[in-house]
Amino acid sequence: MKKSLLSLFIIVAITLLAGGPMWVSAQQAPPAPVSGQMNIAPPPLYNPPGLTLAPPASMPPGAPVAAPGAPAQTEGPPPAAAPPLPPAGALGARLALGNALKAVTTARDAKKYLAPGKVWIDRGPAGEVTMKAAIVYQGVAVGALEFDPVSGAVLPRGYHPRVFSVAMPTDTIKQRLPNIIAKLRVLDAAEYRDPEHSWVIPLAYNAEVVAHIKVYQDGIHIVPDYPVTQEMQAYGR
């Protein structure tokens, strides 16, 4: 009996000693994406609920992403979708507009976690060429920057030069990308897009709006850019 208890004690001690350092290391690093899921929460950042990455496979475009301060999601069914929009009328308008400031604050908090993604070449209907680079939040694209394929300059939103060949190496864009993303500024304003139930907050670089980040209507969930994520995964390098 004593030998059995002693053996059990030794097994438990070895397990704790082997697993302890691994547990500490896991707690120090931000959670990594789970294949097929995007239930990711970055390290705690502020007291209000954080941004939550929603799985694209189970939610339509315009559904939430995840955020600083939110508890890490466990494996299993994805979190429930956000509540439906309030009824039309004055009350509904007040609720939607009242979340604009919250959405801008959420975008600013998420800005600290934005990272450079992959770079790829996009060709338009007439054969015109643009270079794109993904803006990534917790492994998911939430926007894209566009570059002049000749000079490598960051292009303002809405400007599409008619260029049909690439002179700027993608490796050069990759090297510049971290510094560009670090200098992005979240502007103090939000546009509401009703079909997507989202706030759209512009990102500026050198006084030009170069990208946007979307926040769900509740003002606390980042919305992934699924088309950009698909392009990045298919063509990015």
Image (spheres, rainbow, N blue to C red):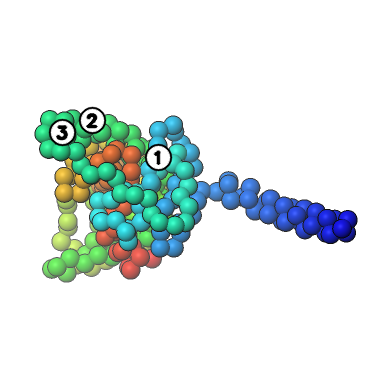
Residue under the point 12% across and 30% down: 90
Separation of disc 3 and disc 1 at Cα?
A: 24 Å
Amino acid marked by disc 2: Gly
Considering the numbered disc 2 on the image, is that residue within a helix, a strand or a loop?
helix
The numbered mark at residue 98 is 2
Q: Which is more N-terminal, label 1 or label 3? A: 1
**Residue 192 in view:** yes
**Residue 112 in view:** no
- Look at the image and tell me in which quarter the C terminus lies: bottom left
| Residue where numbered disc 3 is placed | 93
Give the crowd class for mark 1: few <14, some 14-19, many >=20 residues within 10 Å. many
Residue under the point 44% across and 57% down: 76
Front residue of 128 and 95: 95
Residue that lies at the very extreme toward the right in this rendered image? 2
- Compared to 11, does 30 lie above or below? above
Q: Is residue 127 left or right of residue 33?
A: left
Q: Which is more N-terminal, label 3 or label 2? A: 3
The numbered mark at residue 50 is 1
- Compared to 111, does 20 lie above or below? below
